[in-house]
Image (cartoon, rainbow, N blue to C red):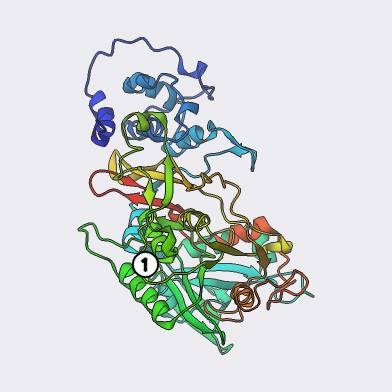
Amino acid sequence: MKNFNFLMLYFALSFAIAGCEKSIEDPTTEAPVDNRETFEDDPFKNLVKDSILYYTKVFSLWESSMPPEDLNDILIQDTLRGYTKYYETGQDVLSWLMSLTPIDPTTGNPIDRFSFLDRQGAVSSEIQEAVATSYGMYLIYLQTNPAVNNAELYVRMVDAGSPADGVGIQRGSRIISINGNSEIDYVTQEASDFEFLNNALSASSMNIVFLDENNQEVTASIRSSIYTYDPILAVEVFDLGTKKAGYLAFSSFVSITNTNGSYTQMYRDFEDIFSTFASSGISDLIIDLRYNGGGLVETAEYLADEICPSSANGQLMFTYDINDLLESEGFLTDPEYFGPVSFRKSGSLNLSQVYFLVTNETASASELLINVLEPYMDVLLVGAYGSNSAKENTYGKPIGFFAIPIVSDDIELYPTSFQMFNSEGYGDYFGGLVPDIHTYEDFLKDFGDPEEGLIAEALYHIQNNKFYNAATAKSAIASIDKLNAAKVVAVKSIGKNQGAKGMFKFNKDQIKLK
């Protein structure tokens, strides 16, 4: 009989049992650590560290790579402390455990680059309630003058409803100065490892000067604050003469149901959008996931049911893989947890082809949606060139997590706990999904603009049944984005909640799954 409460509570109870009888060998002989110094002075930190080892060992997809070798030994407190005392923080313990996982052949690094700690419930709020705390703008450096070996700071996305949105900042806005400092160009900021920019975007408020859509300077003061954002970035129906194409861009797979079972605004918005697509008689569909880092599995299932052809109804959508302990408890066959999921066709669309616009930030639930549709319809991926015209795959995250409150409600542990496979058994895309065509993203054109690079590529294929070739692909920034890829990524991620990049599956009763 499976019992998550048992797995969750046994750890707490074991600390109340005195007089453990089993003799414990030195754990460092099983997993080498730096044992020159120990950290045991803070009882709260000790409990956090021990909890991280316990729950990661129990729930990790790669638990067999982690100590102790005998799973039963983790029920003995001295065993846990024998490992964790050599690490100063809970994050240090988690990083060590992640380093023990098998090597990913696509990167040459440990395969678990995903597990993380979330404090103050930021991830749960963002995914379940579409609530975030930030300025709500995400930045990128663009070299818009190829004759100048430098780049200026631009906005690539703004959360609708955010503080940045409230003062008129939008995609394509150029940032002139922050807190009176106009030396925010790439070369200047790189020299100080972007310290000023990082500090400014982490502060509670800022004064900012930017160029609006009319190229006029606007001065504004904004505060980093809690806001409810709208994940829908744009919805369009493109009339292409003999065809009509629906277009939907959204930034996150936020929840479609509340904790009480009622539907959220996200659900109602999706229902309206797909109803509009159906009544407009679209023949093709473009889903823009270029910055969508994932979200709830439930939402991905809902969208797959809306997009799939009628012939997929009742067919297998995906299966899970979990560790041996969880499988032995029966979770792999229970539909409430990790049983196989089948399509339940909804809506009146009956498409045979769908286009997805993707970048290397397209991750997790976004990739799941793409992967589960592949066996049942023609799925075409339009990808983006990165810096130096490097072809980018999607992020490569076919896994998800349990969200486990540890020690207090302010700390949640997300150990990588399950992997998902489509009906053809494919799910090992840790190197990302490979686009059918790459083109240049136009950061100066908004979502839904038919002249934007990725959108234009999809529309061209719909009309001509072929893509542009590499020699003729056009975009406003083609051949001028020459920044080093690693540096661009580092700047682009500033201010964005990276913890939300994942697959979340919040169970109705006890445990949250991501």
Res. 73 visible in picture: yes
Q: Label 1: state its secondary structure.
A: strand
Res 73 → quadrant: top left
Res 489 → quadrant: bottom right
Q: Which residue is mark 1?
A: 225
Residue at the (47%, 58%) spot, across then down: 369
Residue at the (45%, 55%) spot, across then down: 365
Q: Is residue 494 above or below residue 175?
A: above
Please tell me which residue lies in front, 275 or 194: 275
The N terminus - image quarter: top left
Residue 479 x %, y %? 75, 71
Residue 45 relative to residue 168: left or right:
left
Residue 74 x %, y %? 36, 23
Res. 15 visible in picture: no
Please tell me which residue lies in front, 259 or 24: 259
Please tell me which residue lies in front, 454 or 350: 350
Please tell me which residue lies in front, 248 or 77: 248
